[in-house]
Amino acid sequence: ARVVDPGGNDDERRFEAALRPKRLADFPGQPRVSSQLALVLEAARRRGAPPDHVLLSGPPGLGKTSLAMIIAAELEQPIRITSGPAIQHAGDLAAILSSLAEGEVLFLDEIHRMARPAEEMLYLAMEDFRVDIIVGKGPGATAIPLQLPPFTVVGATTRAGLLPAPLRDRFGFTGHLDYYSGADLATILHRSAALLGVDCTPDGISEIASRSRGTPRIANRLLRRVRDYAQVHGSGIVDLEAARSALALFDVDVSGLDRLDRGVLEALCKRFAGGPVGLTTLAIAVGEEPDTVETVVEPYLVREGYLIRTPRGRAASDKAWEHLGLTPPEPAVT
Ligand code: ADP
């Protein structure tokens, strides 16, 4: 597992649970989504009715799950957590929907990965608070409508574009989460350090923030590694020296690129003269699957302008050459 992986794993969840902000007022960053949500929730509270269904979209590790939990906390309602991949049959969803309490929040992570028949059941449930329970099979099957108490769906997706329009339309409020600024990440890191009981210095925190790829999950993970380093090799304080040494040890460079990112850029520049080169050829050169290069490595390199996707393949930008301390070849004179 990469230390800069924006996705989490089960082992990490227990650390994350302790660091999640509990209320909207403790949730730094995302000022637009945060203030819009505050309004939607306050209006619902005053009406004494559940708010519109909420869709949160954005890359992994930016706080969608945290916000879903915050929504439930602000509404003082329980939350039921499940995910698209866990709902492979309409019956799975029917079982969940029919057991929801009035006002409960249903969090559907990775909602774009739900099975199609379940999706159709969800439309009806979101719109009319109703599910049709199918009894029997074949021509004799009948649908028995079951009325549900009103509840709130909070859907999360990394790919809002993949959601079918009818499902997207059922959400009255959509919040798009964006990568965090260094200042917001520093705020998050100061808060996490306090929760972990670790002393830190502002320059130590800024150093971690600037290498965290705009992603709180990565920031919190790097913080834990720097804390380990400080406790073993340093004064126990997360300062600039500990941050630099720990991140060098874990191969996260000043721009947040790790060994794999640099490997791809180096292959592109040194072996293919900066490209363009096909994805498969590039992947073979770094000993990875094309799919890994495309989905795990490229998004950040493209977003930060190190790598350019062209119709003829992948190419290194000037920024990539500069980052590696290499000189691009002179363009051929024709
Ligand atoms: P997502 O569901 O988008 O993948 P999570 O909500 O699971 O992201 O967040 C991942 C980690 O990052 C959690 O540990 C959470 O505490 C932290 N985190 C995310 N956003 C924030 C934020 N705005 N403030 C503080 N911590 C955050």
Image (cartoon, rainbow, N blue to C red):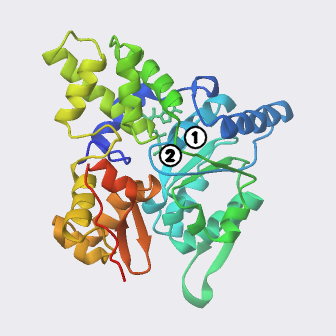
Whether the residue carrying mark 2 lies under 8 Å from ligand 1 is answered with no
User: Going 54% across and 58% down the picture, which residue do you hit?
Assistant: 95
In the rendered structure, which amino acid carries the disc numbered 2? Ile
Q: Secondary structure at mark 1?
A: helix
Residue on which disc 2 sits: 81
User: Going 50% across and 46% down the picture, which residue do you hit?
Assistant: 81
The quarter of the picture where residue 128 lies is bottom right
128 horizontally vs 153: left or right: right
The spot of residue 303 in percent (x, y) is 46, 55
| 1 vs 2, front mark | 1
Let me know if residue 133 appears in the view: no
User: Relative to residue 288, is residue 250 depicted above or below?
Assistant: above
258 horizontally vs 177: left or right: left
User: Going 56% across and 68% down the picture, which residue do you hit?
Assistant: 162
The spot of residue 259 in percent (x, y) is 21, 49
In the rendered structure, which amino acid carries the disc numbered 1? Ala
Task: State the mark number for residue 206.
Answer: none
273 horizontally vs 334: left or right: left
* Marks 1 & 2, CB-CB < 8 Å contact: yes
Q: Quadrant of the C terminus?
A: bottom left
Q: Residues within 10 Å of mark 1 (few under 14, many from 20)?
A: many
**Alpha-carbon span between mark 1 and mark 2:** 9 Å
Residue on which disc 1 sits: 68
The spot of residue 10 in percent (x, y) is 31, 43
Q: Secondary structure at mark 2?
A: strand
Q: Residues within 10 Å of mark 2 (few under 14, many from 20)?
A: some
Compare residues 11 and 302 and report the one nearer the observer: 302
The spot of residue 275 in percent (x, y) is 31, 72
Compare residues 165 and 296 and report the one nearer the observer: 296
Whether the residue carrying mark 1 lies under 8 Å from ligand 1 is answered with yes
